[in-house]
Image: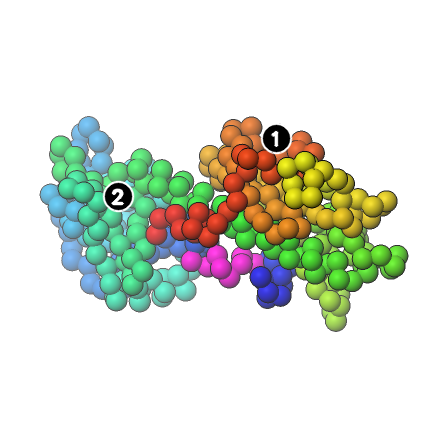
């Protein structure tokens, strides 16, 4: 990980490796908004409403997709309601779409759009060269084809977890690199090179990994987002905590990273999901050896992580390999 990533973290911007996955669900949804802006949408008849589903049903998945495009084109709230239900904004945050989003995905729609069969009775609307997909599948029921909102919300949850877990892995690696950079200079003028014991520096000092740099001053090696543990304030759905010792299962055995008042013998951090099962599932740890481990700590992840005394990767902690990372599992 290079210096560019440190500066991006310091300026509270997402890491570049995340661009494809941190476009967020908003970006996925904006794909659909471009349906109406990029190529002509044929007028569609008023859809039939199934009394059981209380949703619009269609004879073909293409008809469902065309009707959706018509709703986007005309900003037809009533039609969105018929297609997706009264809570359609939970899936399509239309108010948050920027002109740039529209332009980007307009081009993608013009280049390529298709329906991807997921068996005989389910299809996904895909757009662009990389075939980004609408998270809400079009499925065939007894009355016809319709948008399965329940499946869509579950797919959105899975995508969100995958993106957040990937961001967490990159964040603990950024923490590792930031500590290595921090220890190359004497930040408190005590004649000792040491690691930072906290994320955010005391005002007017550089005793943490982040400080407010005045014009002309060296930027801190890490942003301040990893320190936020307020509700809804986690970094990409995760909280982080610095560990100051390691246990018997760590390389080198059990010992404290503290030497007097300075943390010189090593460093470690743990990351856990803010909302287990919604913002993430796996927890992650890394130390000065640079190996990221993951474990599902279960619904009590927060309490376990917040009370964890040491970095101690026993057999339940599994090393994260590239092929195992969420990057390879996030649905497009």
Res. 304 mark:
1
What secondary structure is marked by label 1?
helix
Looking at the image, the residue that sits furthest to the left is 59
* Marks 1 and 2, how far apart at CA: 37 Å
In the displayed structure, would residue 34 be above or below residue 250? below
Taking the magenta stretch, the answer to whether it contains residue 243 is: no
Position of residue 294 in the picture relative to residue 90 (left or right): right
Magenta: predominant secondary structure element? Answer: loop
The way the protein has been coloured in the rendering is rainbow
Residue, x 69% and y 58% (percent of image)?
Answer: 180
Q: Which residue is mark 2?
A: 137
In the displayed structure, would residue 210 be above or below residue 293? below
Q: Residues within 10 Å of mark 2 (few under 14, many from 20)?
A: many
Looking at the image, the residue that sits furthest to the front is 252
Res. 56 mark:
none
Quadrant hosting residue 151:
top left
State whether residue 249 appears in this view: yes
Taking the magenta stretch, the answer to whether it contains residue 17 is: yes
Residue 299: image location, x then y, percent: 52, 29
Position of residue 306 in the picture relative to residue 190 (left or right): left
In the image shown, does 317 or 215 lie closer to the viewer?
A: 317
State whether residue 232 appears in this view: no
Q: Over which residues does the magenta segment extend?
A: 13-20
In the image shown, does 278 or 184 lie closer to the viewer?
A: 184
Residue, x 45% and y 43% (percent of image)?
Answer: 161
Residue 97: image location, x then y, percent: 41, 56
Residue 269: image location, x then y, percent: 65, 44
Residue 48: image location, x then y, percent: 15, 39
């Amino acid at each position: 990980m290079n210096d560019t990533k440190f500066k991006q973290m310091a300026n509270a911007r997402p890491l570049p490796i995340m661009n494809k996955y941190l476009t967020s669900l908003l970006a996925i949804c904006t794909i659909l908004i471009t349906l109406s802006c990029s190529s002509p949408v044929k007028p569609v008849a008023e859809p039939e409403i199934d009394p059981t589903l209380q949703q619009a049903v269609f004879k073909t998945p293409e008809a469902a997709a065309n009707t959706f495009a018509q709703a986007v084109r005309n900003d037809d709230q009533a039609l969105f309601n018929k297609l997706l239900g009264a809570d359609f904004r939970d899936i399509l945050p239309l108010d948050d779409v920027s002109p740039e989003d529209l332009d980007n995905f307009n081009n993608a729609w013009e280049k390529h759009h298709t329906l991807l069969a997921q068996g005989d009775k389910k299809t996904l609307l895909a757009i662009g060269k990389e075939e980004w997909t609408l998270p809400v599948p079009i499925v065939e029921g007894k009355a016809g084809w319709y948008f399965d909102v329940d499946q869509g919300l579950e797919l959105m949850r899975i995508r969100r977890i995958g993106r957040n877990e990937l961001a967490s892995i990159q964040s603990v690696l950024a923490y590792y690199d930031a500590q290595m950079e921090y220890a190359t200079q004497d930040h408190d003028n005590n004649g000792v090179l040491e690691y930072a014991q906290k994320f955010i520096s005391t005002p007017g000092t550089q005793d943490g990994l982040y400080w407010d740099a005045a014009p002309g001053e060296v930027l801190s090696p890490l942003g301040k987002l990893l320190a936020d543990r307020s509700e809804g304030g986690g970094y990409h759905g995760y909280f982080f905590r610095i560990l100051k010792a390691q246990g018997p299962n760590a390389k080198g055995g059990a010992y404290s990273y503290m030497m007097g008042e300075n943390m010189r013998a090593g460093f470690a951090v743990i990351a856990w999901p803010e909302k287990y099962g919604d913002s993430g599932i796996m927890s992650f740890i890394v130390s000065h050896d640079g190996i990221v481990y993951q474990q599902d700590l279960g619904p009590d992840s927060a309490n376990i992580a917040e009370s964890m005394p040491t970095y101690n990767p026993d057999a339940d902690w599994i090393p994260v390999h590239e092929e195992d990372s969420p990057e390879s599992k996030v649905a497009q």
